[in-house]
Every structure is written in C-alpha cells, then in structure tokens.
Image (cartoon, rainbow, N blue to C red):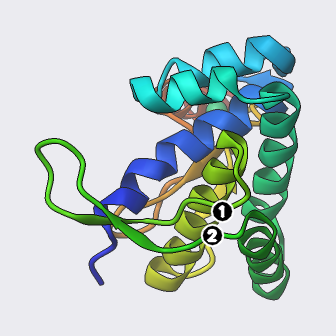
Amino acid sequence: MEIACNVTRQAPRIVELVNLATARLRGGAPAEPLAGEELVTAFAAGLGDDTRAALRAGPDAGAGLAALATELREALLAERPADQAARINAMIRRYGAQPYLVEDVGQPFHLHFHGSGGTPVEALGGEFATALALIVDGYGPARFGQCEAQQCEAVYIDLTRNGSRRYCGAACTARAKSAAYRTRRRG
Ligand SMILES: [Zn+2]
C-alpha cells in the first residue's frame, strides 16, 4: 500500500520528539530528557520556519510537547495491538485531527491531519496521531519499538520493506553488532 508522503515525513519527527523528551538512555549513555524551553528549541530545530515560529509563540509549548511525547511513547510501545489502537484513537479524538488538502510551495496538493484545538502543539498532536494510525493501517501494528541495543531507550518507527529494524540508528546497530561479536568470541 502507498502511504501518503506526509506520513513518512512525520515519522522521524515523532521519533525525534519522543526521544528528546522521554529517553533516559541514548546510544549507550545516560541522557537528560528535555523539558520546557529546551525541549521546544531542540524539537523546533528540525521543523519548517512557519511551524517553528508558531510553536515558539504558542502558550506553554514545552509542557504540551512533553505531554504529547509521553502519549506517543505509550502508543508506540503498547504491548497489545488493541491497546495500541485504543491509545492512537484516543489521541486522534483528543487533538481533533481533521483531514484537509494542503498545497505547499513546489509540491502538489497533499493530505494533512492537523488537530483542530487551536494551539500549535494540538495541531502537531493531530498530525502525529493520524500518522501512527496510517502506519498501523498500512504496515500493521508491529512497526514501532524501543532500540534493542544496550543502554538505549530511544524508540524507532520501521517503514522498511521487510520490517526487520531493531535499533534506533546506525550507531546503535554498530554497537550491538560489536557486542554480539565480543560475546561470540568469549563463548
Ligand atoms: Zn539506540
């Protein structure tokens, strides 16, 4: 199935927000989950100019982003598909996600799902919750996970063809491989 390109664009943003705000271990080392202004600044760095400005101007964006990150993490790592679906559905309702067509500069019309609550964080919440729903619909419920490398709590979203991803990124994949190699040599 062809997933809307907007959804594949949202996946790394969802992962980035969850990891910035909730991971206490990343890539083999302790990490300080970000909150408040620090979270807004770090997360906004990866967004377009308009979204970044709106987020910075919005009320209490740091607290809103932290709450959204926690909800997203719980949905991503829910053990049972029914629980995962219920969490995603609850977010879609809470953020009032609504489909509408947008024409960005240089792009054809494509579908967005901004939340309708009014604040930039609520808009993002609707977009992110719908992206997760479309990924479950298109790829099944098992495309989200927590990095399996030692000392890493980062999450990932796996949009690869065969769904074989187990690590958050290249660094943890390399760490896990060398750990497995050392274990084999000892054994
Ligand atoms: Zn990792």
Q: CA distance from mark 2 to mark 1?
A: 6 Å
Kind of element beneath mark 2: loop
Instruction: Tell me the quadrant of the picture where the C terminus can be found.
Output: top right
Answer above or below: position of 106 versus 92.
above
Residue 124: percent from the left, percent from the top? 62, 49
Q: Hey, what amino acid is under mark 1?
A: Ser
Does residue 90 appear in the picture of this structure? yes
Ligand 1, image quadrant it occupies: top right
Residue underneath mark 1: 116
Q: Which residue is mark 2?
A: 97
Q: Is residue 151 visible?
A: no
Q: Secondary structure at mark 1?
A: loop
| In this picture, residue 114 sits left or right of residue 125 | left
The label shown at residue 132 is: none
Where residue 35 appears, as percent x and y from the top left, is 85, 21
Q: Is residue 48 above or below residue 126?
A: above
Q: Judge from the rendering whether residue 46 lies leftward or rightward of residue 83; answer left or right.
A: left
In front of the other: 48 or 132: 48
